[in-house]
Image (tube, rainbow, N blue to C red):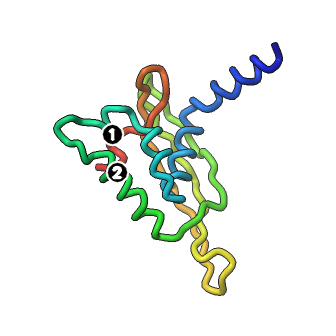
């Protein structure tokens, strides 16, 4: 019984807008294209008229990884939700060349737009356009 409750709690906490937004930024920074694709709604990654769409998204994520930044800290500053749409404003502290003499740190305010599809929060495709 306790195990079932813990599993249910873990599943529910994964579908909060701020959790999805943080997972997205982390995956974009590390170049984890498969996680990015899983966080997008199905219509954003598959289109019979554009069979290469998912491959282009994978390439975009890999290019982003080449920037070499790492996430040091990430906090949800504000979550605005209106029905099936939400915007999560994250404050993200990045580091470039971690541990090197040339290490540089900077913080950015990163808005992540989310939409609810099939009962789960996903990253809006408009984040790529």
- The reply to whether dot 1 and dot 2 touch (C-beta < 8 Å) is yes
Q: Which residue sits furthest right?
A: 2
75 relative to 48 in the view: left or right: right
How far from the left and from the top, in percent, is residue 74?
A: 63, 53
Note whether 92 is above or below 52 in the view shown.
below
Task: Check disc 2: other Cα within 10 Å, few if <14, some if 14-19, many if 20+.
Answer: some
Which image quadrant is residue 92 in?
Answer: bottom right
Q: Position of residue 86 (x, y in %)?
A: 46, 33
Residue at the limit of the structure toward the left, as seen here: 49
* Residue 2 against residue 97 in the figure, above or below: above
User: Which residue is rendered at x = 41% and y = 31% of the image?
Assistant: 115
Residue carrying label 1: 45
Q: Secondary structure at mark 2?
A: helix
- Residue at horizontal 40 percent and vertical 64 percent from the top: 63
**Image quadrant for the N terminus?**
top right
Return the mark for residue 79.
none
Q: Residue at x 34, y 41 (%)?
A: 125
Considering every residue shown, the one lying at the far top of the view is 1
**Cα distance in 3D space between marks 1 and 2:** 8 Å
For residue 57, which numbered disc appears in the image? 2
Q: Can you give x and y, in whole percent of width and height, for residue 96 in the image?
A: 57, 73
How crowded pointer 1 is (Cα within 10 Å; few <14, some 14-19, many 20+) is rated as some
């Amino acid at each position: 019984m306790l195990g079932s409750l813990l599993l249910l709690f873990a599943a529910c906490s994964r579908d909060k807008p701020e959790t999805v937004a943080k997972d997205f930024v982390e995956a974009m920074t590390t170049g984890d294209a498969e996680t990015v694709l899983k966080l997008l709604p199905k219509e954003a990654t598959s289109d019979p008229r554009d069979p290469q769409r998912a491959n282009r998204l994978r390439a975009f994520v890999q290019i982003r990884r080449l920037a070499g930044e790492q996430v040091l800290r990430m906090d949800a500053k504000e979550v605005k939700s209106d029905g099936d749409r939400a915007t999560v404003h994250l404050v993200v502290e990045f580091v470039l060349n971690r541990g090197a003499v040339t290490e540089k740190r900077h913080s950015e305010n990163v808005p992540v737009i989310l939409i609810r599809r099939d009962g789960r929060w996903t990253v809006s495709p408009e984040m790529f356009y």
